[in-house]
Amino acid sequence: MTKLRNKMEAWYHKDFVIDEDGSWLLLGWKGRIVFGATCWIPA
């Protein structure tokens, strides 16, 4: 996650955000969540 944030700060617009909430990876633009991704493990 830290590596991804560093790349994002270097190459992407300042209003593009990336965050982690539990097991979710959240991508957003200007404070709004645009996309969320997670990986499920089969039970």
Image (cartoon, grey):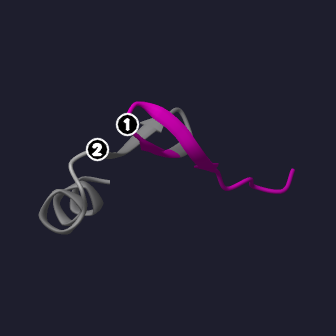
The amino acid type found where label 2 is placed reads Asp
| SS type, badge 1 | loop
Rate crowding at label 2 as few (under 14), some (14 to 19) or many (20 or more) other CA atoms within 10 Å. Answer: few
Q: Which residue is drawn at 74% across and 53% down?
A: 40
Q: Nearer the viewer, residue 8 or 13?
A: 13
Q: How many labels does the image show?
A: 2
Above or below 19: residue 1: below
Residue 28 in picture, x, y percent from top left: 46, 43
Residue 24: x and y in percent read 57, 42
SS type, badge 2: loop
Q: x%, y% of residue 23?
A: 56, 41
Q: Where is residue 5 in the image (x, y as percent from the top left)?
A: 24, 54
Residue placed most toward the observer, 40 or 18? 18
Tell me whether circle 2 and circle 1 mark residues in contact (CB < 8 Å): yes
Q: Distance between the residues labelled 2 and 1?
A: 5 Å
Dot label at residue 30: 1
Task: Name the residue at 84% across, 56% down.
Answer: 42
Q: Using residue 10 as the reference point, say whether residue 1 is left or right of it.
A: right
* Other-residue count near label 1 (Cα within 10 Å), few / some / many at <14 / 14–19 / ≥20: few
Quadrant of the rendered structure where residue 20 is? top left
In the rendering, which numbered label is found on residue 10? none
Is residue 27 a member of the stretch shown in magenta? yes
Image quadrant in which the N terminus is located: bottom left
**Which residue is at the front of the view, 28 or 42?**
28
- Amino acid type at circle 1 is Lys
Q: Please give the range of residues in magenta.
A: 26-43
Q: Earlier in the sequence, mark 2 or mark 1?
A: 2
Q: Which residue is drawn at 16% across and 59% down?
A: 6
| Residue 23 magenta | no
**Any mark on residue 15, and which?**
2
